[in-house]
Amino acid sequence: MEIYYIDRKTGEKKKETVAGEKSLKWIHETNSGKTLLELLVKKKLFSTLYGKVQDFSISKRKINSFVKNLAIDMNEAEIEDINKYRNFNDFFTRKIKKESRPINYDDNVLASPADGKILAYENIDINSLIQVKGSLYTLKELIQDEELANKYNKGTYMVVRLAPSDYHRFHFPDNCIPSSIKKISGSYYSVNPISLKNIVNVYCQNKRELTILNSDNFKEILFIEIGATCVGSIIQTYTPNKYVNKGDEKGYFKFGGSTVIMFFKEGTVSVDKDIIKNTLEGFETKVLMGEKIGHKI
């Protein structure tokens, strides 16, 4: 399975370079791989141990090849010299220069919370949310709160998928007061499209963390981080119930690709037309943290 996305700057369709693509395909598309996935790979212990290994100094040896193979632009990073990182996780959770990700501070604008590839759906049915074509789940299953889920029916749903090559810190999409975290334990399936195609209800099965953002311009945003295979942990760096500005850091993922999902109530946001168009045609759109992805209704 080849993965294509739309480069927003050029409008071109591009093929994604997938880290560990052969392993992902073997795990999800062969009988022996599927057995290993269920017995070991999806387990918390596997991802926790794998994540811990990335904290050892010896893990820094693979930074150079990782940067080259995935074409990561280190000029964007606060620390450009890869030899100055203590270990792989130190590199993976690197901060970037403010000028590398300018924030759109217009009050009418919704900013992307992360670098990644986005899908967006408007006028949603909370009982039929799309994971991938042909695979659905419900918001109640995802957040385990029927009363809260009902508030977002006919609203808007956005999924930002972070690949291993992406900047892995996530930020607030608007000025807001964020609630404390609700944690839901679960498995650690990959969130790569190869996994999403083969595993039912990945988002509802994986570990996830929920926050309500009481937003200045978009009412109550339901903000969810999804854990994934080899994600050592989801680290929250914000202070609950304290006012934050658009673009302020909320947290970061340790090693592994992962996902940020946002839900908006009906009549609060209009998603940019190119993102909706690409989604309807079955393509994710590459976005950068801080750029406009929608506007206030």
Image (cartoon, helix red, strand yellow):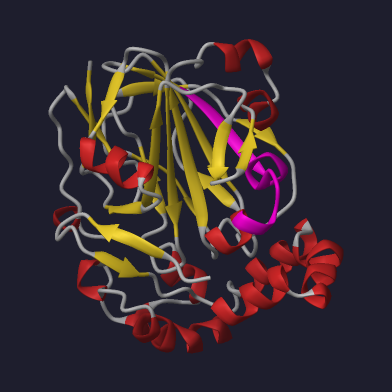
Q: Can residue 242 be seen in this view?
A: no
Q: Where residue 230 sits: x, y (%)?
A: 63, 65
Determine if the magenta segment contains residue 190: no
With respect to residue 238, does 3 lie above or below? below
Question: For this view, does 260 lie left or right of residue 47?
Answer: left
Split into 4 quadrants, where in the image is the C terminus? top left
Tell me the quarter of the picture where residue 21 sits. bottom right
Q: Which of 180 and 1 is in front in this view?
A: 1
Residue occupying the point 64% across, 79% down: 23
Tell me the quarter of the picture where residue 197 sits. bottom right
Tell me the quarter of the picture where residue 290 sits. top left
Q: Where residue 46 sits: x, y (%)?
A: 76, 66
Q: Is residue 99 visible?
A: yes
Residue occupying the point 58% across, 12% down: 150
Question: For this view, does 246 lie left or right of residue 172?
Answer: left
**Magenta stretch?**
197-212
Residue occupying the point 34% across, 35% down: 172
With respect to residue 255, does 249 lie above or below? above
Q: Where residue 256 sits: x, y (%)?
A: 55, 64
Q: Nearer the viewer, residue 276 or 68?
A: 276
With respect to residue 62, does 225 lie above or below? above
Q: Which of 154 and 23 is in front in this view?
A: 154
Q: Where residue 182 sits: x, y (%)?
A: 63, 28
Q: Total marks drawn?
A: 0
With respect to residue 235, does 7 lie above or below? below
Determine if the magenta segment contains residue 200: yes
